[in-house]
Image (tube, helix red, strand yellow):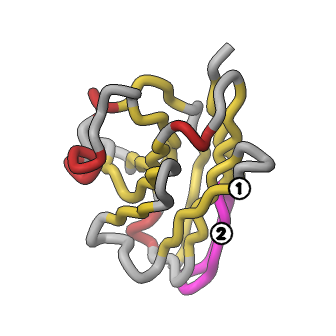
């Protein structure tokens, strides 16, 4: 069964760090791109980062650029999101998702949910001021 399992969320203070993991099963990460989204209460789900595993290209939304780093470990079939200098506005449920095979790289930064075909269950990140 094709699945994504997100983990690593928790409570952090402003200025602190957390690392999220997205473990894939049922498929090989090297052949797909993976994105991270987040959704805060009362707000729409927001695309924040993606990695195109075929060539290692990475993408970031302006809201996290310079603070978050996405990476991939093919041996563990896992994608990571290192989050530094956290802010209270980063509080949200974080989801990882697989980019659909038909999507071309230039579309990734549209952060459109219909470009993703498999979603993880979400992990809560709370940042206190």
**Which residue is more in the foreground, 114 or 91?**
114
Q: Which span is picked out in magenta? A: 9-20
Q: Dot 2 corresponds to which residue?
A: 18
Of the two numbered discs 1 and 2 in the rendering, the one whose residue sits closer to the viewer: 1
The kind of secondary structure element at disc 1 is strand
User: Could you tell me if residue 88 is visible in this image?
Assistant: yes
Q: CA distance from mark 1 to mark 2?
A: 17 Å
Left or right for 74, reference 39:
right
The disc label shown at residue 109, or none: none
User: Which residue is located at x 52 percent, y 42 percent?
Assistant: 96
User: Which residue is located at x 45 percent, y 72 percent?
Assistant: 88
Q: Is residue 129 above or below residue 35?
A: below
The kind of secondary structure element at disc 2 is strand
Q: Position of residue 22 (x, y in %)?
A: 64, 45
Q: Position of residue 34 (x, y in %)?
A: 49, 44
Q: Position of residue 109 (x, y in %)?
A: 25, 53
Q: Is residue 114 above or below residue 56?
A: above
Q: State the residue lying farthest toward the front.
A: 55
Report if residue 65 lies within the magenta region.
Answer: no
Disc 1 crowd rating (10 Å Cα; few below 14, some 14-19, many 20+) is few
Left or right for 97, reference 71:
left
Disc 2 crowd rating (10 Å Cα; few below 14, some 14-19, many 20+) is some
Q: Position of residue 79 (x, y in %)?
A: 63, 52
User: Could you tell me if residue 42 is visible in this image?
Assistant: no
Q: Is residue 112 above or below residue 15?
A: above
**Which residue is more in the foreground, 1 or 43?**
1
Q: Dot 1 corresponds to which residue?
A: 73
Q: State the residue lying farthest toward the right.
A: 75
Q: Of callouts 1 and 2, which one flags the residue occurring earlier in the amino acid sequence?
A: 2
What quarter of the picture does the N terminus occupy? top right
């Amino acid at each position: 069964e094709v699945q994504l399992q997100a983990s690593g969320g928790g409570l952090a203070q402003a200025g602190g760090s957390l690392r999220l993991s997205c473990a894939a099963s049922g498929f090989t990460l090297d052949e797909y791109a993976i994105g991270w989204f987040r959704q805060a209460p009362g707000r729409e789900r927001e695309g924040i980062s993606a990695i195109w595993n075929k060539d290692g290209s990475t993408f970031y939304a302006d809201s996290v650029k310079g603070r978050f780093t996405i990476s991939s470990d093919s041996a563990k079939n896992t994608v990571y999101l290192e989050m530094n200098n956290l802010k209270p506005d980063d509080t949200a449920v974080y989801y990882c998702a697989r980019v659909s095979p038909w999507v071309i790289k230039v579309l990734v930064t549209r952060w459109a949910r219909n470009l993703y075909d498999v979603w993880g269950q979400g992990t809560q990140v709370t940042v206190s001021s």
